[in-house]
Each structure stands twice: as C-alpha cells, then as structure tokens.
Amino acid sequence: MDLFIDRMRSPIGTILLVWQSDALRALDFYDCEQRLHRLLQLHYGKYRLVPERPPAGICNPIEAYFDGDVTAIDSVPVQTNGTPFQRQVWTALREIPAGRTTSYGELATRIGRRGASRAVGLANGANPVGIVVPSSRDRSERGAHRLRRRHRPQALAFGA
C-alpha cells in the first residue's frame, strides 16, 4: 500500500502527515517517527511511504489551526484504520466542541456503550491522528480523567 508523507513545521515542533486519497491517515511528531512506523505497520501491514506535498484540504486547515482558527481542523478529512469501536470513539472525539470537556464515561454513554469508559480511554490512546482528533486529558474536580478539545494550539506544547 502506498501512503504519502510530508513534514510540516508547527509552533509545537515538526509534525509528520501521512495521507492517502486526500484523507489524513496518521499524524505524529517528527521525533516520534519510529512510533509512527509501528502504528502504520499495525494498521496497514505492508506499506510504502512516498514523499509528496500534502493536499490543501489537509495542510491548510492544520496551518490555520496553528494560526489560531481552532475550528479549522474540523474540516480535515480523516480516514483511519482500527477496530469499528476505535473509529466510533475517534469520530465522537471530533464532535467535542473546542474548549469543552467530557469524561471517558460520558463519551462511552454518548456512543451507546455505557460502562465502557476504560475501553474509550484505550481507544483514545490509540488515536493515530492526534491534534486533528483531540486526545488531551484533564482532571476534573473529582479527579476523573476528562477529555478536553484544545482551544489554544500553543497549549499543546506546554500541556496547559
């Protein structure tokens, strides 16, 4: 399987974009390239990365996001492999409005899988397109893990 790859500079470091057919397949930091290769092997088996400039529909919204338009990444087309449950969780993560929080349990209930909060957390951790599919966690007042859709791109660099 041929996948396309390119590097993109960002305020939080160089990121790698992997896509096929105008849809983002994976996104990771340049210094985590080995992790990216393990993920691609897991999801696609045999693959070949072909260097190429990303389509405007992928890179322009990501650049706009880092320039402060926090909703721009909502338009990035994403096509990921993973289990049907993982893909369901990743879709639900994209529906969290920027700046809002939810818990794994709330997200599990929202997708019709009440009681599957641990499975939601594991799916969140396996997210291949971080930043575009939000995966940041906060702690609520009660100490429960909470998911927060970032509303400040610069906050990613400091974990704020």
Image (cartoon, rainbow, N blue to C red):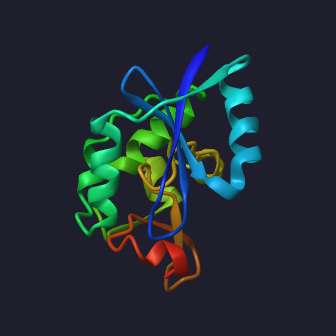
Residue 131 visible (yes or no): yes
Vertical placement of residue 119 versus 23, above or below = below
Q: Is residue 110 above or below residue 19?
A: below
Q: Where in the figure is residue 115, as x and y percent of width and height?
A: 57, 49
Comparing 69 with 6, the one in front is 6
Q: Is residue 159 visible?
A: no
In the image, 137 versus 30, the foreground residue is 30
Residue 69, picture quadrant:
bottom left
Position of 81 compared to 35: left or right?
left
For image coordinates 33% across by 33% down, the residue present is 55
The residue sitting at 63% across, 52% down in the picture is 125
| Quadrant (top left/top right/bottom left/bottom right) for the N terminus | top right
Query: Picture coordinates of residue 71 (x, y %)?
Result: 23, 57
Report the residue at 64% width, 45% height from top: 126
* Depth check, front residue: 123 or 112: 123
Q: Position of residue 148 (x, y in %)?
A: 43, 67
